[in-house]
Amino acid sequence: MAHRVFVGLSGGVDSAVSAALLKERGLDVVGVFIKIWQPEFFECTWKEDRLDAMRVAVALGIPFREVDFSEEYKRDVVERMIKDYKRGITPNPDVLCNRYIKFGAFAEWARHEGAEGVATGHYARIRQHGGHKDLLRGADRAKDQSYFLYRLNQRDLARTAFPVGEFTKAQVRDRAKRFELSVAGKPDSQGLCFVGDVSLKDFLARYIPLERGRVEDMSGRVVGEHHGAALYTVGQRHGFDLSDARMRETPCYVVGVDTVANTIRVSPERSDAARKKVRLRDENWVAGLPRLPLAVQAQTRHRGNPVPTTILREGTALVASFNEPQIAAAGQSIVFYKSVQGGGAGDVVLGGAVME
């Protein structure tokens, strides 16, 4: 890792311990609070988070800086997210934030300001492997954030550190206490990263007309009402009201979303929401394009279980072919892993894409 490192201090415990660990290793550490866009119509916590980040810098005796990427965040994350919801697909703003802000605008700004590398509090790991760098899952599988980092490349990994990736969350909090950091017991943030505890419905209602509409079964029969088609994702099993008594007896899956007609389609059969194949777009390979077809373990949700999958070309399209049908929501990311043996190495991120 480079000698002078800019650490993105979010005001949370993970980034604080990351900065402390790097300083303990003798690196020249600068703490940076990244201000992102937040809606004026909700009460946000960014001022409190900035104050916590400043306290961490003071406690560690490191310089503190602040950079404002509100404009970039609104353009590259929020506006893209709203556009996708309007189309009836479910985006992944954390992936966009990592690509365009933390390892895009922030990393470039840090380089121009004299940093030789950047660090964040992500639960992931980087290792040198032959002539390239691997991106691995974090040691704490329950906190692993590698799913959101699949769009990084070799240039990113060469100038990035994830200091807490080797630890569990409990170990990170223990180290925060040892370093006497005020955020040692601070709860993890929840919800959308830029609106805090505000619900997705309340946020989207400011940008998308959300009107109650029809819930239909597989034959097109009206069986209930929903709260706005843009709020629903294929595979979802809650958030809509069923008037059909028989369908209320068992969980129903959303199998289709039509934002133009403002309808959603549901089924009690999980298989109706599952697909054997899914077309992909916006692919990224962490260490370069491999030879296809390629057998991988694919993860279609952050908390999902990896499943055996083959990545191949069908004409000009990149396709994921699952060994068994899977629920695959359009707009969400699919991340490709391979397992490596020995030394607790875990799983390597090969790359990923967005599911069509």
Image: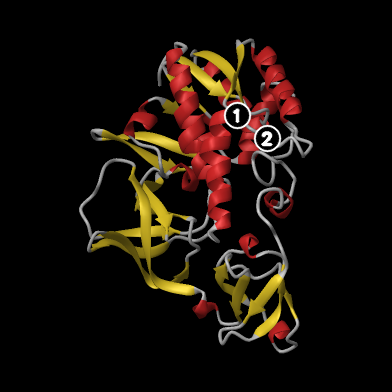
**Residue 339 pos. (x, y %):** 36, 52
Identify the image quadrant of residue 307.
bottom left
Judge whether residue 21 can be spotted in this image.
no
Q: Do the residues labelled 2 and 1 touch (CB within 8 Å)?
A: yes
Amino acid carrying label 1: it is Ser
**Residue 145 pos. (x, y %):** 52, 44
* Local crowd size for mark 1, using a 10 Å CA cut-off: few (<14), some (14–19), many (≥20): some
Q: Which residue is drawn at 58% across and 49% down?
A: 82
Q: In the rendered image of this protein, does residue 201 appear above or below residue 71? A: below
**Residue 337 pos. (x, y %):** 38, 52
Amino acid carrying label 2: it is Gln
Between discs 2 and 1, the one toward the N terminus: 2
**Residue 139 pos. (x, y %):** 50, 43
Q: Which residue is drawn at 46% across and 24% down?
A: 107
| Residue at the farthest bottom position | 246
Q: Which residue is drawn at 65% across and 16% down?
A: 57
Q: Name the residue under label 2.
A: 38
* Residue 262, disc: none
Circle 2: element type = loop
Circle 1: element type = helix
Q: Mark 1 points at which residue?
A: 70
